[in-house]
Image: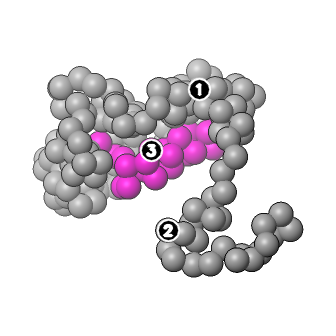
Amino acid sequence: MQPERLQGTNYSVQSDVWSMGLSLVEMAIGRFPIPPPEPRELEAIFGKAVADGAGGSSAPRPRPPGRPISSFGGGGGAPMAIFELLDYIVNEPPPKLPPGIFSQEFQDFVNKTLIKNPAERADLKTLMAHPFIRGAEAEEVDFAGWLCSTIGLQPPATPTQPAT
């Protein structure tokens, strides 16, 4: 849930921008990003050393009192109680992508979606003009073909791609 909604303000499109950013981080690291993973968990996920999920500092990210530090495999330890999670979203720094894993453009795009103050958070027009989106629009990606090859299926026939 978005910090502004937890503080009782009205829902807006900016709330969806936050949700999109949080979902992008979750898909990128393979688990819900709150609390943030420790460097060793990120190393296990990505197969290389990562400074930490806080953007490169070596200081650990804040954790709710009484909660164990996560271990690899879905956050580890006991899950956060709902009120701990909600308090964390409101009072702690937003999630960040691990440095050195993703492009600077993608990191910047995600960071602009996860600004706590919705008035400062990027709006849709800004996001659509972002270099990450512009670059993605320019690429020709055959997602269906990639997915089929990944799971061992024959790609379906399309108007531009005959069946093989």
Q: Assign the C terminus to one quadrant of the image.
A: bottom right
- CA distance for labels 1 and 3: 16 Å
Is residue 129 in the magenta section?
Answer: no
Instruction: Tell me the element at label 2.
Output: helix
Q: Position of residue 1 (x, y in %)?
A: 50, 48
Magenta-colored span = 16-36
State yes or no: discs 1 and 3 in contact (Cβ < 8 Å): no
- Vertical comparison of 117 with 17: above or below: above
Q: Is residue 150 left or right of residue 156?
A: left
Residue 84 in the image: state x and y as whole percent: 30, 48
| Label drawn at residue 121 | 1
Give the foreground label among 1 and 2.
2
Residue toward you, 143 or 15:
143
Q: Which residue is mark 2?
A: 150
For this orientation, the residue located farthest to the right is 159
Q: Is residue 128 visible?
A: yes
**Which corner quadrant of the image does residue 122 belong to?**
top right
**Mark 1: which secondary structure?**
loop
The Cα–Cα distance between marks 3 and 2, rounded to whole angstroms, is 22 Å
Residue at (20% x, 56% y) in the render: 72
